[in-house]
Amino acid sequence: MSLKMLKDQRLIYWILMILVIYITINPIGLPISITPSTREVYDIIESLPPGSVVLSCSDVELGTIPELMPGYVAMLKHCFRRDLKIVHYSFSSEAAVVTPMIFDALKDDLKDKKYGDDYTIFGFIAGMEIGVASLATDVQATFGADIYGTPVYNIPLMENLKTAADFDLVITAVPASYYRFLMRHWGAAYGMPVLVLPVAQVVPEAMSFVKSGDLAGVLNSIRGSAEYELLLKSPGDAIKALDIQSVSHLYLILLVVLCNVGYYISKRSEKT
Amino acid sequence: MSEIIKNQKLGLVITFVVSFLVILEYYFPVGILVSSVAEVKVWSVVIAYFMLFIGAAVTCINHLKTVNRRTKDDWPYSVYSLLIIFIMIVLGIGLSPESTYYKWIINNMYGSSLMGVLCLTAFYVFASAFRLLTIRTWESLILVLASFLIMMKNVPIGEVIWSGFPIISDWMTNTIQRGAYTGLIMTIGMGSMIMGILTIIGRQRRRE
């Protein structure tokens, strides 16, 4: 091993990979405090009376599964534990793959639930914002049939659901600013509370809408998902992911410090 | 009439009428207006489904052209793309999207390769991030400090190191960041509104 290896960028990647693999196998279990934003989301779902109808709108894509799936599953788990009715659909074209994954993770909570009465799954609705707007004004015509081909008018849960006003809450997980569709057509038009689980880079923007009242609550990406799992007393992938995030962030800070020290040393030696 | 169609004025007329009705329905939700606009929205969803087919068809046509001409070196990838599209269409329509073979390809080929590519980008982002955070000016010092505080806020180890990190980061998020984002969102909103009005009245032209 020569000193030249230390200048190789691949060394950074190798160390990061080894750290991530090590922490995945041996999680540290750092304490996680609950932030007010997560508590708000939890309290909103907790305050709904049993039998309330929730629109679960998933835009979880394959690439965002590690970041969004744990928190979204936790929110749905909470809804099922509170005996809320769930109407699930997706405006992501990867719904065919991701939706079964979401409901596989909820297997235990669905044991005492009846499909069609307690929850129903519609597939992919095209059109992004057009689909959301159409759903708000005419739920039954927009859905048409569920993923098993059952016409919407034959599903008991959907009998009294005609427009957005017939729902009690909207929850969504988004990889970009797509929550705005629900905010505009469900939140602003019908006064529906909208809870959002966005990816980390969308959180600051989404938080602005919480302050203005356009959104009811925002979960702070993987951190919020881990806190939610703690509140539910149902630890999962989000809590494990936070340990990995802690270590990788510390590693990045160490590299930043080393990089800056190296930069100033080289600058000083150039001057002399 | 043919002149209206030829000059694409029909598209502008439809855009204006439909947009006007939708805006009117938003502010005056009365009887027939609500039901007609709801119907229009459902039609739009149907059109969106057709657009997916058109998108797939255009993709196939472009790949076929690339294979036919073989002017670019990556024409074998176009062959591969067409083969995969064909296989997935046959499996999806012939069997069903719930079939084992369809799901196997999606989960083990598409899903795995997509996640692999995203993980690779994570490494590159990591490597470029620590180079970006070099303190050369006062502005870069603020950037480094802000990044550090946000990183410490989002991970549990931040609170373990010092309990003050979340307090400072929350203040930064709730005052500075939120204020900046609110201003940005309002500006974007006004711009979008103007763009929408120009589109509705047919003044939004493509610049040649």
Image (spheres, coloured by chain):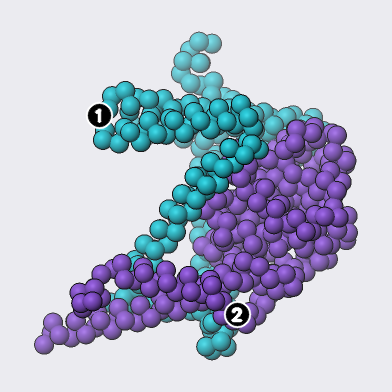
Secondary structure under the numbered disc 1 in the rendered image: loop
Residue in front for this viewpoint, A232 or B158:
A232
Quadrant of res B166: bottom right
Which residue is pictured at 50% across the width and 42% down the height?
Answer: B195
Badge 2: residue crowd in 10 Å (few <14, some 14–19, many ≥20): few
Q: Is residue A2 visible?
A: yes
Placement of B50 over or under A75, stated as above or below: above
Which residue is pictured at 56% across the width and 69% down the height?
Answer: A241
Determine which residue is flagged by label 2.
A29
- The N terminus of chain A, quarter of image: bottom left
Placement of A80 over or under A130, stated as above or below: below
Which residue is pictured at 67% across the width and 59% down the height?
Answer: A72
Determine which residue is flagged by label 1.
B71
The amino acid pointed to by label 1 is Thr
Which residue is pictured at 53% across the width and 41% down the height?
Answer: B105
Quadrant of res B89: top right
Residues at marks 1 and 2, CA–CA distance in whole angstroms: 56 Å
Residue in front for this viewpoint, A7 or B171:
A7
Q: How many marks?
A: 2
Q: Percent position (x, y) of residue B129?
A: 37, 68
Q: Is residue A182 visible?
A: no
Identify the chain of the residue marked 1, using the numbered disc in the image: B
Quadrant of res B147: bottom left
The amino acid pointed to by label 2 is Gly
The cyan one among the chains is B
The purple one among the chains is A
Q: Percent position (x, y) of residue B52?
A: 55, 32
